[in-house]
Amino acid sequence: MAYNAASTLARVLDRVPLSFRPRVTQVFVCDDASQDSTYLVGLGYKQITADMPLSVIRHGRTLGYGGTQKAGYRLAIEQGLDIVVLLHGNGEYAPESLEEMTGPLERGECDAVLGSRMLVGGAARRGGMPVYKYVGNKILTRFENRVLGTRLSELHSGYRAYSVKALASVPFERNSDGYDFDTQLLIQLMHAGKRIVEVAIPTYYGDEIRHVNGLKYAAEVSGDVLRYWAAKRGLLADSVVEIGPEYELKGGEGGSHDVVQRWLQRMPPAHVLDLGCSSGLLAERIRRFGHRVTGVDLQELPGVSARVDRFVCADLDHGLPSGLDVEDGYDVVIAADVLEHLRNPQQLLEQIREVLAPRGTLVASVPNLGHWYSRGRIALGLFDYDQRGILDATHVRFFTRRSFRRCLRQAGFTVLREEATGLPLEVMSSGRGLLGRVVRVLDRVAIGLRPTLFAYQFVCQCERSAQGAGSHGWA
């Protein structure tokens, strides 16, 4: 990538090692609407160089540091390349290190390589990094490591190499067009479970880096990592990652899946239909109690077939799939955190009633829209979807306790018992230790006093009512 790099671009390209050039399939010189002759220099270099396949691209408008990377990575994906390296046109990072940067990727050791100026003690200062930038880099990196749980020596080098396959697997198009793009992409790769390694690189400070507003950059990067931390814990919607597609097991103390497990543990071995089984984590635990589990979900996630006795791939928004019939019906049907994802949950409930054994039970749970959190958001005019929780972006229906009971009743069910769950403190650091125990006790007391306001979810065990579907009597 290059911006106003007319005086340095040719020298940077000259420094690409001759031994490395035969392994290069394509070099994209991305001129980000420079105000100098960077584009013309690139075209001229292409004419006189036979051993380097150059494509010189000039953007019609300035896309920014992150926007330029997006354009380059799209090209790499479209052309089916294996590895892409981010190299600055101002000479800030050494082309001589290209072999070291790509080696771990070529050997299949990782999915991303970060060039680090801090890996070798004292190297950054000897290379000319100013004291204030060195200290700021160290402090910011330490903060990010603490929040993200990483142990990297530097998170602010712009010399990076990526597996193109790894890039294609994350939503990098959603990222900022600014300098914090690198941080956001790193978060996405980490969240996706990609392997990241560092290699030592020499330090050189060119003109381009001086255009970065250090305080603004630090604030943006800190905001990115904190938003990710909060989104992963269900506290915020604004994040550069999707917290999915695997639906997490809500098995913390008092969570909906914890309630389902406790109820199933007390039942004799039964044939269970687990709707929306995701990767089968809940089913796996239920099977330990002697139950046989048939799982249904929209896609077959890794490991699900080993965790259920039988898996059926189906879209529950279209109702129960055919071929689920078992002799005498299912003893238990679980619809844990499923109904809120359906446009017509009533239809599914009525179909569940038909596949239940004569004395079978339905165990269903839904998030409570009447919870103080969602009520407060709506009252303040701040309604929006979150990455997870009550206002999960995948929820298309919302329930209060009254509307949930009514939905069950109209589908032909009678509620045998109901349990309200509390805040999902297990996903928060405050959920552990003395403070976590105090908060949990207070939460349980509040639920007991007013469940419609403080219950996070409602879990119900139901049986088929004598009146059948469409009954309007009060439960």
Image (tube, rainbow, N blue to C red):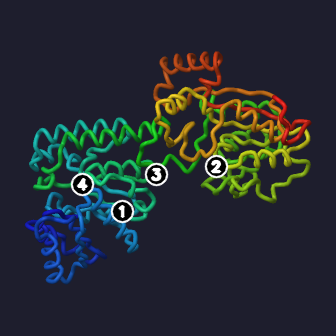
In the image, residue 165 sits, relative to residue 387, either above or below, namely below
Counting residues from the start of the chain, the first of labels 2 and 1 encountered is 1
Please tell me the numbered disc located at residue 29.
Answer: none
Residue 353, position as x, y percentages in the image:
84, 44
Residue that badge 2 annotates: 278
Q: Residue at x 17, y 62 (%)?
A: 3
Residue 57, position as x, y percentages in the image:
24, 73
Residue 293 can be seen in this image? no
Instruction: Evaluate if marks 4 and 2 touch, with contact meaning CB atoms under 8 Å apart.
Output: no
Please tell me the numbered disc located at residue 105.
Answer: 1
Residue that badge 4 annotates: 158
Q: Amino acid at mark 1?
A: Leu
Residue 258, position as x, y percentages in the image:
66, 32
* Relative side of 13 to 442, left or right: left
Residue placed most toward the observer, 382 or 104: 382
Residue that badge 3 annotates: 192
Label 3, label 1: how far apart the Cα atoms are: 17 Å
Q: Nearer the viewer, mark 4 or mark 1?
A: 4
Label 4, label 2: how far apart the Cα atoms are: 38 Å
Label 2, label 3: how far apart the Cα atoms are: 17 Å
- Element under disc 4: loop
Counting residues from the start of the chain, the first of labels 2 and 3 encountered is 3
